[in-house]
Image: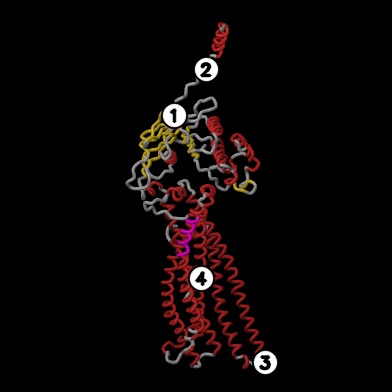
Amino acid sequence: MRSFWGLLGAYWVSEKWREAWALTIAVALLSAAASKSGVWLAQASGTFIATIASFHDLGASAIADVLTAAGVLVGLALLKFAVFLGFRHYFSTTLHRKWRQWLDGRFNAALLSDHRPYYHLLVMGSSDEGSNVPDNIDQRIQESIKAMTGNALGMAMGLISVVTSVYFVGEMLLSTSVAIHGLDFLGSYASAVLVFALAVTYVPVSTAIALRIGRAIEALNVAMLRYEGSYRAELSMLVRRVLPIAAARGEQVQASIHRRQYQAIDRTWSVQNKISAIFLAFNGSYTYITQKVVAYLPNMPAYMQGGISFRTYVTGSELASELISDCSWVIQVMPDIANLRANVNRVVELADAIERVQDAQAFYRETGISEFRYEQQAPERGLSVQGLELMFAGKEAQPFLRVARLSIKPGQWIFVRGPSGSGKSCLVKALNGLWPYGRGRVIMPEGMKALYACQDTRLPQASLKQLIAMPEDEHEHRDLEVAAIMSAVGLGDFIPSMGNPYYRGRRWDDVLSGGQKQKVVLARILLHTPDVLFLDEATAALDPEARTEFHRLVRQYCPKATVLSVMHEQTPPTDSLGRPFYHAILNIENGRAGLEPVVVPAPPPVRDTRGGLRSMLSVMRHRP
C-alpha cells in the first residue's frame, strides 16, 4: 500500500477478496444496466418530443400517443433511477463502508504493532533536521481514507458507466446511421462517423483545458488538507491544555496561534474559490453548448438532406449528446480526480512512513545517530548497560548523557538522581527502546516481564478495569482480584463502576485527579507484578504519605522485582521506620552517571531519662 495503485487495489487481493469482488461485480452490472437504460431513455425521449412536434398531424390518436410516449419515458426513467441506480447506490455504499473498514483496520494494526510505530511517528519522529514524517496522522486515517475510498468508488462507477454507455450508444448510432450526400465514401455509416469524429476532436481539446485546471486544484487540495489537519490538531491539543492555559491566562497567545493557522486555511481557500469559479464557468459553458448546440450538429446534414425524420434526428442528437457527455467524463470529475490524488498521496505517505519506522534505528539514522543494541542475558545476571550515550537529533550531535557501565542485580532498587534537564527520564526511555538518538548496549534479563510507568498519566477511553489490566485484556482478570487491588491502592470508591467506560457520564481521564491516575498505574503494577519495573516520576502527583505507601505496596506485591526509579526528590524515600526502599543511587552529574550506595542515616541518640532523673534528684538533695 505504498503506491497509488497498490493502495487502491489492496482490498481486492486481501483476505476479503470474495466480499470485495462480489460487491464490485454487482455495482458493475447495475452500472451497465443503467447505461443501457440510458439508451432506451434517449430513444423514448426522442419519440416523446417527436410525438409532441407532430401532435396536430396525429388526428384522433394524438392525445393517446403523447400519453403513451410519456408513460414509456416515465417507466424507463423509474427503471433507471429507482431500480438500477438505487440498488447500485446501496451496493456501492456498502462496498465503500467495507473497504474503508478494512483499510482502517490495517492502518491501526500497523500503527499499534509491537514495533510501536505510532510512538515514533507521533512523539519522537519529527525534528528540525529534515526528517520525512507525515503530519496529522489522525486526519490521514480518519478523513483521507474515507474521502479516498469514496472518490475512488465514485470514479470507478463513472468509468464503468462511461465504457458501457459508449458501447451501447455507439451500437445504437451505428444501427441508425444513414448516408450523407458528399460523404458517399462512408456509405451508410456517414452520420455515425460524424458523431464519432466530433467526439474525438471536440472532447480532447476541452479535456486538456480541464487537466490544466485540475493540476492547480490538486495542489490546492493537498495544501488545504495539511492546513486543516494542523488547525484541527491544535484545537484538539487545546482540550489537553485547558488548565495550563487558564492558569497562565494564555487565552490571547492561544488565540493568536489559532489565527495564524487559520490564515493559512483562508489564503488557500481564497485561491481555491477562484480556481473553482474558473472551472465551474468552463464546465457549465462546455456542458450547455454540448447539449444544446454541438450534439445537434453531426446529424443536421442528414436531416437537411431529408435522409432522416425529425424523430430520428432528435433521437440521434440525444444519443450524440450522451456519447459526448460520456467521453467528457474526465472533465466532469476533474475536481474529484484532484481530491482523490491528494488524499491517496497523503495515505501513501503514511503507509511509507509506517513501513520505514518498522526499523526504528534505521528510521532515526535519517536524521541523527542511532546505534543502540538491545540484547538479553541470563536472568540471574540482572540488567546491564555498556557504553550508553544519549544525544539529540543531528549527524554531528554530541552526547548529553553518558553511562559507561551499569549493572543492576536482580531485586535491586536503584534511585536515579540528578538536576532537572540532566537526562533522567531520557535514560529510562532509552532502556525501554523509546529514545531515538545515541548509541550503546542495553542488556535485559531474558524472559523477565518489564513494566514502564511514566509521569504522563493521560488515560485512553476505556473502563477503569481495562485501564488497570493493560496491556492484557480485562476479561483475563477476575473482578474480585482487581477490586482487591483497587481497595489496596485507595480506589475502592470506584469499584462498583470499574467495568464502565464512563463514571456518571464522564470519561475516567476527566474524573480522576493526577494522584488517582498514578494510583491506577500502581494498581496495574500490583496486578501484573513485573520482574523489572521502571518508575519515571510515577509518584510525582502523590503526597509524601501516599508516596511511601506506593513504595510499600510495590515492595509487598513485587518482592523480587528490580526497580529503577526517577523522582524529584534528592534523597530516596524511606518507610515509616526510616529504612530506605532503595539499595543504591544512580547519580547524574555533568553529563555522566555513576552508582553510589545509599547512606543510611544513623539513628538519633537515645537519651537516658533515668540518669537524668537521678541527677535532678541529687541536685535537689544538696540544695540548701
Residue at the disc numbered 1: 584
Residue at the disc numbered 2: 606
Residue 562 numbered tag: none
> SS for tag 1?
strand
Residue at the disc numbered 3: 60
Residue 158 numbered tag: 4
Residue 258 lies in the magenta-colored region: yes
On screen, 109 above or below 176? above
Q: Which of marks 3 and 2 is nearer the N terminus?
A: 3
Q: Residues within 10 Å of mark 2 (few under 14, many from 20)?
A: few
Residue 588: percent from the left, percent from the top?
40, 35
Q: CB atoms at circles 3 and 1 under 8 Å apart?
A: no
Q: Residues within 10 Å of mark 1 (few under 14, many from 20)?
A: many
Q: Which of marks 3 and 1 is in front?
A: 1
Q: Nearer the viewer, mark 4 or mark 1?
A: 1
Residues in magenta, as a range: 255-267
Tell me the distance, in whole angstroms, between the alpha carbons under discs 4 and 1: 72 Å
For the residue pair 403 and 33, the one nearer the viewer reads as: 403
Residue 30 lies in the magenta-colored region: no
**Residue 454 appears anywhere in the view:** yes
Q: CB atoms at circles 2 and 1 under 8 Å apart?
A: no
Outermost residue, front side: 624
Q: Tell me which amino acid carries mark 3.
A: Ala
Tell me the distance, in whole angstroms, between the alpha carbons under discs 3 and 2: 131 Å
Q: Nearer the viewer, mark 3 or mark 2?
A: 2
Tell me the distance, in whole angstroms, between the alpha carbons under discs 2 and 1: 28 Å
Q: Tell me which amino acid carries mark 2.
A: Val
